[in-house]
Image (cartoon, rainbow, N blue to C red):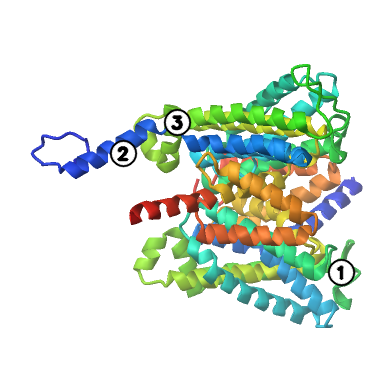
């Protein structure tokens, strides 16, 4: 088949090539449709709610962190912006929701909205400054932005509580009906619902023409520029949307734990989410759904025993995944499936 | 008036000592990033282990100071060659993200190992007898060890710059930084060059870690807590440059000391803002092509 897909240039196109092209087109046209596999995470999440009533507090944290991973995947996996400062948005959201609740405006959804707006504003302002660069300078600037916000939050004792963290939050019941209980039942379902909506949004974005253009920019920025894509604006839009989602994730953690620590803006918060996403698989939408629970459950089990060993093994795992298991768990699964298909 | 003068002299003096340590540690990172195009977040690991090796040799085995430093440099350089051959090499020319994650993994492993073998506290550092106390430089007294640091730094910087300008090895590095393919085409063994310059950079980092243990205490959080400083020096200085990071280190060392002295509340905040502004102005650093 010739490049333009136009036959009649005198070249005979084999039937097999035609069929292969048609199949590719069909896969492409159906990419956005819901597949049966995509129900699995939600069924599992609901099953966990009934099966492990004692672990719902941890479960709520995991769900919120999955949303955080999803926001990172949008900017890193699809738009290809390598960031070491995503905690800037997580923390901004957490402090926004936290301050609202601490000053008598504890309506949870209002808190989420304000957190999303605040984080998106930070993403938009800093993004419009730093997204003009690429590579290491960009990496450095994302790190600088997060570190500056961390310093600010740490020093602004009277507002944020500084190193002691923000206390005195009073979050109102969800829909005015469901109080946040001690067992984390409300928290779990609340986070699950927000995550579900966030997932729908991100899924819609990555399959939209806008999302396709992001992937194009990631793969070949010069070419996208040449065909008339407003590259900077697209990157900035993706960055701001991702910031808003990360802000919502931060707000969820703040509201369900009724506490904001200054760590919410720290380097570890930016680094660990990268690791969780890497373990699951970057740029695949579901990396966070696999990597985050794996990491956080393992951390909950092992880190209590000995945090020193925990970091050693995580470091080793990171090196091994980068060296031998590109694409994390989902990447390995994809390769195994392909091998199976090829074997048939 | 004399008070302001005394304060500025203090700031300059301590800033200079800090800058020398920063430069020694970071210059190797600049070469790794500029020459191999490798985003190496694990460079501080080499400095930390250099510091651990030097302090342990001195305090536990009673090895004299210069000998302990030399041993630390050799040990770390040898270990870095193994790392480069086994790990780094596979990711040259690969995705930035893979490099970032692999080196974060190395940092985690190194920090955990350091905590396991040496415990969570900072290592005690005792300079030899003649370098303790104060030294009288005519118009006022200065801490002897820091004066020694500045002197050492000046000698090493001169040696490094002369070496890069006058030796064949230096010319090869400059050629490879400028144009890697062309360097390969004219017959430079870039693979060996990478390994050697990586070892040299790590060795210098180990030396900086050992010499600077008084300013940057050696403890398991070392590679993460000072990472931002090393990265600032390299990215502001200009990747692949040998001279650029020196000026960046001077800028960071002196301004950091000044801010900590004059504005302890928001000192580090201004440093980061300054870095951000510098990187916006010249994304490739002060010395790199704009």
Q: Distance between the Cα atoms at labels 1 and 2?
A: 65 Å
Image quarter of residue A22: top left
Q: Which mark is residue B232?
A: none
Q: Circle 3 sits on which residue?
A: A207
Disc 2: host chain: A
Q: Are marks 1 and 2 on the same chain?
A: no
Badge 3: residue crowd in 10 Å (few <14, some 14–19, many ≥20): some
Q: Secondary structure at mark 3?
A: helix
Q: Decide if residue B23 is in sight here.
A: no
Residue B124: mark:
1
Name the chain under label 3. Answer: A
| Residue A83 position within the rendered picture, expressed as x and y whole percent measured from the top left | 59, 43
**Tag 1's secondary structure?**
loop
On the rendered structure, is B65 left or right of B91?
Answer: right
Quarter of the image containing the N terminus of chain B? top right
Give the vertical position of A334 relative to A125 (above or below).
below
* Residue on which the image places disc 2: A24
Quarter-wise, where is residue B153 in the image? Answer: bottom right
Q: Earlier in the sequence, mark 3 or mark 2?
A: 2
Tell me where residue B201 appears, x and y as whole percent.
60, 67
């Amino acid at each position: 088949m010739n490049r333009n897909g136009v036959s009649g240039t005198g070249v005979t196109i084999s039937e097999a090539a035609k069929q292969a092209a048609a199949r590719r087109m069909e896969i492409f046209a159906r990419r956005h449709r819901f597949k049966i596999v995509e129900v699995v995470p939600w069924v599992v999440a609901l099953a966990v709610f009934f099966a492990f009533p004692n672990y719902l507090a941890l479960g709520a944290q995991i769900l919120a962190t999955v949303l955080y991973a999803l926001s990172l995947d949008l900017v890193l996996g699809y738009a290809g912006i390598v960031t070491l400062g995503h905690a800037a948005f997580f923390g901004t959201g957490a402090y926004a929701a936290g301050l609202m609740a601490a000053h008598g405006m504890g309506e949870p959804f209002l808190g989420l909205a304000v957190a999303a707006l605040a984080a998106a504003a930070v993403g938009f302002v800093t993004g419009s400054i730093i997204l003009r660069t690429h590579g290491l300078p960009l990496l450095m600037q994302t790190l600088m932005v997060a570190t500056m916000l961390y310093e600010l939050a740490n020093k602004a004792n009277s507002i944020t509580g500084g190193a002691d963290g923000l206390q005195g939050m009073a979050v109102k019941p969800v829909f005015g009906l469901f109080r946040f209980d001690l067992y984390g039942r409300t928290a779990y379902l609340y986070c699950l619902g927000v995550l579900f909506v966030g997932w729908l949004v991100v899924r819609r974005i990555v399959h939209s023409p806008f999302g396709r253009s992001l992937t194009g920019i990631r793969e070949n920025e010069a070419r996208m520029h040449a065909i008339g894509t407003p590259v900077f604006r697209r990157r900035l839009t993706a960055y701001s949307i991702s910031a808003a989602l990360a802000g919502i994730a931060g707000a969820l953690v703040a509201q369900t734990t009724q506490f904001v620590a200054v760590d919410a803006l720290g380097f570890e918060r930016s680094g660990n989410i990268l690791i969780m996403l890497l373990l699951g698989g970057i740029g695949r939408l579901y990396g966070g759904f696999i990597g985050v629970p794996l990491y956080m459950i393992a951390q909950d089990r092992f880190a209590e025993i000995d945090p020193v060993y925990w970091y050693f093994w995580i470091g080793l795992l990171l090196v091994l995944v980068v060296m031998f298991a590109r694409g994390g768990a989902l990447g390995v699964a994809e390769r195994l499936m392909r091998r199976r298909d090829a074997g048939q | 008036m004399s008070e302001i003068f005394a304060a500025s002299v203090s700031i300059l003096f301590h800033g200079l000592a800090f800058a020398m340590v920063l430069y020694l540690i970071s210059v190797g990172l600049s070469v790794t990033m500029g020459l191999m195009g490798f985003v190496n977040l694990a460079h501080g690991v080499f400095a930390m282990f250099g510091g651990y090796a030097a302090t342990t040799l001195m305090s536990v085995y009673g090895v004299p100071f210069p000998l302990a430093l030399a041993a630390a440099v050799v040990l770390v350089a040898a270990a870095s060659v193994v790392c480069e051959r086994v790990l780094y090499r596979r990711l040259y020319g690969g995705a930035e993200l893979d490099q970032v994650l692999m080196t974060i993994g190395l940092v985690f492993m190194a920090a955990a190992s350091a905590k396991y073998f040496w415990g969570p506290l900072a290592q005690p550092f005792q300079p030899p007898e003649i370098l303790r106390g104060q030294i009288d430089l005519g118009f006022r007294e200065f801490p002897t060890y820091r004066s020694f640091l500045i002197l050492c730094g000046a000698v090493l910087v001169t040696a490094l710059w002369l070496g890069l300008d006058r030796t064949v090895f230096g010319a090869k590095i400059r050629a490879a930084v400028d144009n890697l393919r062309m360097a390969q085409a004219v017959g430079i063994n870039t693979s060996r060059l990478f390994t050697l310059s990586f070892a040299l950079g790590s060795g210098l980092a180990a030396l900086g870690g050992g010499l600077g243990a008084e300013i940057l205490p050696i403890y398991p959080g070392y590679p993460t807590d000072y990472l931002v400083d090393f990265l600032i020096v390299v990215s502001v200085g200009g990747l692949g440059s040998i001279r650029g990071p020196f000026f960046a280190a001077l800028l960071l060392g002196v301004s950091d000391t000044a801010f900590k002295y004059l504005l302890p509340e928001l000192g580090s905040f201004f440093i980061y803002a300054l870095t951000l502004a510098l990187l916006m102005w010249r994304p490739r650093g002060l010395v790199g092509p704009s």
